[in-house]
Image (cartoon, rainbow, N blue to C red):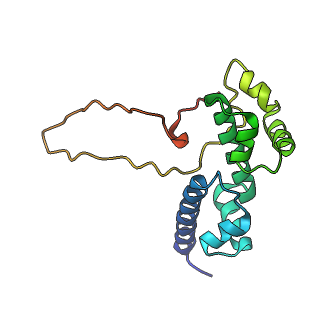
Amino acid sequence: MLPAHFSLMEKSVNSNIIRDLVVWVESHIEDNLQLDDIAEKSGYSKWHLQRVFKETTSMTLGNYVRQRRLSRVAIDLRLTSQSIINIAEKYCFDSPQSFSRAFKSHFKISPGGYRRSENWITQGILPALYTSVHHASTPVRPGFAAALPCRHIGPLPYDVIPLKFY
């Protein structure tokens, strides 16, 4: 039997693998991702990758990709004027019908109804598990502290749009 710290090391390694993989999936969410593609990118077998992903995140890899795709669709429906068909194509749904079925099954409302709703419906939106946003740090000298005003110009990437979940 292996000592307990080996188990912790394995979990840490698995967590790093999954974090890197999720960052890659997020950057390719508009591609027609298949489990084979993701497994090939990771360098692990499909079986092992799915087992480690579920162990680490408590959800299946396929379910994560599907929920993230639908979450991004919901955000696009609210923030863009793209047609529903173009959004369905952008996120690689096979047909407008399969897109509408998947969206309605997940959010309990049609894509058009979601777009027309007065308030954001955040129930069902899954934020990215990990993000690739890096924060810049400023060196601080002993006895000296400064607060510099920061301002962002331009649209925010999807993974940093603040969403309130109630």
Considering depth in this image, is 148 or 87 the residue closer to the camera? 87
92 left or right of 162?
right
At a point 68% along the width and 46% down the height, the residue shown is: 90
Considering depth in this image, is 5 or 146 the residue closer to the camera? 146
Q: Position of residue 162 (x, y in %)?
A: 53, 33
Q: Position of residue 24 (x, y in %)?
A: 56, 59
Q: Is residue 143 above or below residue 54?
A: above
Q: Position of residue 75 (x, y in %)?
A: 64, 35
142 left or right of 17?
left
**Quarter location, residue 37:** bottom right
Which residue ends up furthest to the top in the rendered image? 118
Q: Position of residue 13 (x, y in %)?
A: 53, 69
**Quarter location, residue 11:** bottom right
Indicate the quadrant containing the N terminus: top left, top right, bottom left or bottom right. Answer: bottom right
**Quarter location, residue 102:** top right
At a point 67% along the width and 47% down the height, the residue shown is: 68
Considering depth in this image, is 155 or 56 the residue closer to the camera? 155
Considering depth in this image, is 20 or 101 the residue closer to the camera? 101
